[in-house]
Amino acid sequence: MAIPIVVFGVDCYAENRTQAVTNVLDHLLDGYNKEVRPGIGGKSLIIDTNILIKSMGPFSETDMSYSMQVYFRQRWKDERLSFYLPNITKFTLSNKFINNIWKPNSYFINGRNSKQHNITVPNAFVRLSNDGSIYMSVRLTVNARCPMSLSRYPMDRVVCPLFIGSFGYTTDELIYRWENHVDIDPGVKVSQFELGRIEQQQLSKQGRYGELSILEVYIHMSRAVGFYVLQTYVPCYLIVVISWISFWINRDAAPARVLLGVTTILSTAAIGMTVREGLPRVPYATALDVFLNVCIVYEMAALIEYAAVNYFTKLMPKEGSLEEDQEEENAEPVPMQKMSLPAGQHPPERETLLVTNNANWQRPVVKIRTPIDRKCYHCLFAFWKCLVGSSDYRSYRLEKADPEIGNSVSTIDMVARVLFPLTFGLFNLCYWLMYFYLEVS
């Protein structure tokens, strides 16, 4: 008979406690006006705020915005809701109770298209203490503006802010302050960025109708470069190296060298258009734009280099100068003694070279000195003559050509084999140091 008596006592106590809580809640809001803030006419009401970040993303460079899912928590004191219950100091209420009490009209100043989760029920609750302290937690997806400077993209560092304030109350009535640090769930990872430090501060700003209390959060992130290295930088490096293969191709193979140069230029341009699809049309050049444009410049320089080789050093009809040799073999040698000149004229200064063939006869090869025959081997002078397309310089080069050698390896090609990789490597050294390692102020 003892056991039923104990059970009855426990059930009776639980029933009495439930009835006591019900009576408190039934009369808790008697005469309560949810339109009036607690302590009106007195000191400013303190709103302790806390945020727990559960997930982040996606980030949009085009819209300059980001999204994150947070638990938005606020704590304040409303003495009108204080109560007394034996052995009960606080209890949790459903989200319906939130609609019947006063709550701060907090909003995200730089937010856009934020929403509250309502599946399966509205994700919000209130915990009420016996001294009138209220703790409210709401699950939200916040979409906010995030100004980005893309001059160092994709080696940039992004600082996404979040501003919290009251939509109508000034500091004379309501003051926000951080309850503790902004927390991030340990499992939060972002595919595009690596999360860094979080800065938070509370300040006051002058508004139109008075001073406003504002909370600020700054989330520092650095962009993950691995994706861009694999998808953009490595292919561009390979394409540029492929364009240098033309320096080892015979200068007579014009279709091969021209096709190789044009193909590499178009390939790099296609990669550039692909990576620019997800970026806004900013008026300045990003780090990726600089790299792609330099790659195109090197590929165009390789193509222009062959144009210079073809025009100024490919002097024979084809390798070995067979056509000219056949014409000279068919031509009858003219003795020097039979060449007549008009009276009063002296023969021009000539240089005779005797060439012996298989028929054991000699024929003179006459080389006429021209006024251009002077020391023009200086690199800058030769480059200027090639740049302006000097026909005299080309004629001078033609006269100096050795028919026996024909179209040998061009000096321009030999210089380009060293100059292009050396300068491109120096550019990359400066590029990665400036954009990846050097901090911006």
Image (cartoon, rainbow, N blue to C red):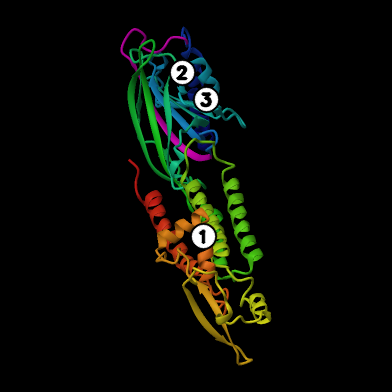
* Residue 394 within the magenta-colored segment of the rendering: no
Residue 7 pos. (x, y %): 52, 34
Nearer to us: label 3 or label 1: 1
- Report which residue position mark 1 lands on: 392
- Residue range of the region highlighted in magenta in the rendering: 35-59
Q: CA distance from mark 3 to mark 2?
A: 38 Å
Determine the residue positioned at 43% across, 9% down. Answer: 36
Question: Is residue 227 visible in this depiction of the protein?
Answer: no
* Residue 39 forms part of the magenta stretch: yes
10 is higher (above) or lower (below) than 85 = below
Q: Amino acid at mark 2?
A: Asn
Q: Which mark is residue 105?
A: 2
Q: First in sequence: mark 3 or mark 1?
A: 3
Residue 70 in view, yes or no? yes
Q: Which is more toward the observer, 108 or 66? A: 66
Measured as percent of width and height from the top left, residue 168 is found at 43, 13
Query: Dot 1 lies on which element?
Result: helix
Q: Which amino acid does the dot numbered 3 rest on?
A: Glu
Residue beneath disc 3:
15
Residue 375 at what x, y percent from top left? 39, 66
Please name the residue shown 49% across and 66% down the image.
412
Task: Describe residue 276's horizontal placement relative to residue 186 as left or right.
Answer: right
**Disc 1 marks which amino acid?**
Asp
